Amino acid sequence: MCGVVGIFGNDYVAQDMYDALICLQHRGQDATGIITYDGEIFHTQKDLGLVRDVFHTRHMQKLLGYVAIGHTRYSTIGGGAVEDAQPFLSQSFGVMLAHNGNVFNSYDLKKELLEHDHRLVNSNCDAEIILQLFTKELARQNDKSKKSDLSVKQISDAVKSVYARARGAYSVVSYIANKGMVAFRDPYGIRPLLFGKRKNGLAYDYIFASESIVLDVLGFEFVSDVGPGEMVFIDEKTRAVHHVKVMPKTLTPCVFEYIYFARPDSVLNGISVYKAQMRMGEKLADKVKKLKLDIDVVMPVPDSSRAAAVAMADRLGIKYREGLVKNRYIGRTFIMPGQKIRKKSIQYKLNPMKLEITGKKILLVDDSIVRGNTSKQIVQMIRNAGAKKIYLAIFSPPIINPCLYGIDIPTREELIASSFSVEQVRKFTGADALIYADLKDVFEACISGNPNVKDMCMACFDGKYKTGDIDEKVLKKNAASRLNDKSCGQIEEEFETGPEKRKKGQLNLV
């Protein structure tokens, strides 16, 4: 999962791009980058770290041009090295590109490109694979036509060639030097991508972004979501905008975007993240009611659980209280690159307010349980602050399957709910009760009132991989790749109990 932005303007756009990436910092903390183009030269700045640390005044002054592509990286494929940071640039054909998602057959494609096409791939990042596939077909189309100008049909054929080879989920923004900007989304539209425009004198500036918040902050008017299997091409010479349905399938956006990843003030695929989380909270409250628990207060784990917790408190008629104060200078622990880092960071990220906790029976609301250790630490933290009872309410279902579409939900062996029952997970976290949301309720909460979304990718919960090309063999191969790729920044370090004890029936949950 990453944040991607493309801006096709009329003058200097680097400052807008910087502001856009700040808005999308929550989507990736590993690395960030911007490439601009001024009509003759590409200008690049990318490095490991946060947006505010990578870009300084001296960098911004050099990022000249009317076109920019930017990226915030959360690595699921590739290592943590700077060469894996996006965007990527193909100097030979003058193409820059970044994407959000995960191409799960990228290692196979890299091998093919090296052995059969003699194309040098300089990183372990799947975005470079997409770039190589795209430019390879662009070059073929150009040689075939023997013309200097590429037609919309030729560019859409190059996009189609990516669809034919790249398996997984990807929302791509690219720019071809002096030809125009190209954006496309995988045939199922799993990862989000929005298109907007802004009046600039007599012309328009155009933008593509992972979330609507970017358009809001920069003053762009929302035009549309890029559709599943759709290419949008903005012609450099005419400024004409071409929408081409290259290979559309059924729109199946990722449900986890609405549970955790996207900002609550964003709207993706016509669905308000905030409203979806509110409805999830209401439906979970109805489930909690039936248990007849003795609850004093409803309390969120900040920040992603606030909307659902407020809705639950309203529905249950119980007081809402903030009992955990977040250090806003600590990043999102879910997307940190190792279990030891996550465990250490949670100690500095949250601090309990004993005044609101001591002697209380608390309904603690959180978005998900992935590995279990974070939930265990938070429950223990609140217990130590004097809570009388802790009822843990999770407004998503148990995560039992890995994600191959761009969320770092790892192998089944690392997912606590995949091997253990709800009661065992409850004991492990130390909660007095554990209530998960039902998948049907989460789905209905997301699509309510939106006729354009009739299906969603919920594979991490139900095992139904929407692209239709993922089976147990592919999952095992993916798991082996994670273990063998020692450079990968997302490979998990040992759990506090040891990974070998995570096998079913061997973990002491007392």
Image (spheres, rainbow, N blue to C red):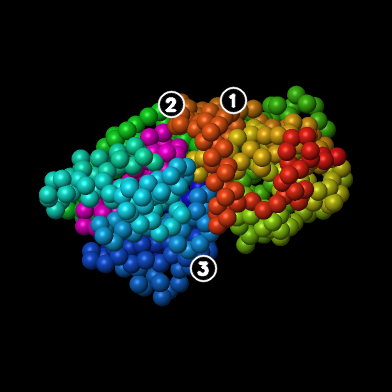
Q: Which mark is residue 417?
A: none
In the rendered view, tell whether residue 173 sits above or below residue 312. Answer: below
- What residue is shown with label 3? 53
| Residue under the image location 37 percent in, 66 percent down | 44
Q: In terms of secondary structure, where does tag 2 sit? A: loop
- What residue is shown with label 1? 440
- What residue is shown with label 2? 451
| Residue under the image location 18 percent in, 49 percent down | 142
Question: Observer-nearest residue: 6 or 275?
Answer: 6
Q: Is residue 174 magenta?
A: yes
Mark 3 residue type: Asp
Q: CA distance from mark 3 to mark 1?
A: 42 Å
| Residue under the image location 67 percent in, 53 percent down | 493
Mark 1 residue type: Lys
Query: Which quadrant of the structure image shows residue 476?
Result: top right
Q: In terms of secondary structure, where does tag 3 sit? A: helix
Q: Is residue 436 magenta?
A: no
